Image: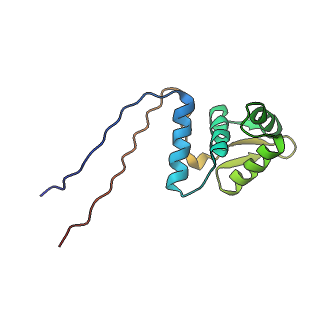
């Protein structure tokens, strides 16, 4: 006898910003990594940019109103690095990017094919 599964199928076309943010949210949810909405916006900007110079990126994020100061942005990025969400490369003009282990897709046509299930245990 086959298990009965209540299936929900949704097909949605999203702008690049939203699909990048969704991938980061799913990663954080599945890895039980808590991020604030400002952290999520910051990571999404970085994901869309793919790589950025640290100081320029902190200024950009501040200008966009994600954080109130470049130092706040820098602190958030340091926390994100400790959580394994971003990597920093270089000595003087550090380059930052979303950690490759997150494996987000940011270019071209993107199709996300997630399948999540919950299987009830058999009742005696």
53 or 117: which is nearer to us?
117
10 or 37: which is nearer to us?
37
Residue 68: percent from left, percent from top: 79, 40
Residue 45 visible in the shown view:
yes
Q: Tell me: residue 77, above or below residue 52.
A: below
Residue 25: percent from left, percent from top: 54, 45
**Name of the residue lying farthest toward the right:** 92
Residue 107 visible in the shown view:
no
The residue at the point 78 percent across, 50 percent down is 75
Q: Tell me: residue 44, above or below residue 108.
A: below
Left of 8 or right of it: where is 82? right
Q: Tell me: residue 24, above or below residue 48.
A: below
52 or 44: which is nearer to us?
44
Numbered marks: total: 0
The residue at the point 25 percent across, 48 percent down is 6
Residue 59: percent from left, percent from top: 81, 34
């Amino acid at each position: 006898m086959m298990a009965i599964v209540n299936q929900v199928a949704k097909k949605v076309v999203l702008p690049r910003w939203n699909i990048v943010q969704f991938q980061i949210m799913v990663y954080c949810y599945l890895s039980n990594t808590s991020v604030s909405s400002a952290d999520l916006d910051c990571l999404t900007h970085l994901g869309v940019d793919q790589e950025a110079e640290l100081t320029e990126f902190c200024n950009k994020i501040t200008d966009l109103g994600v954080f109130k100061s470049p130092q706040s942005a820098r602190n958030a990025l340091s926390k994100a690095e400790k959580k394994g969400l971003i990597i920093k490369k270089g000595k003087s003009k550090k380059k930052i990017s979303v950690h490759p282990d997150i494996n987000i897709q940011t270019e071209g046509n993107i199709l996300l094919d997630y399948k999540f299930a919950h299987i009830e245990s058999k009742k005696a």
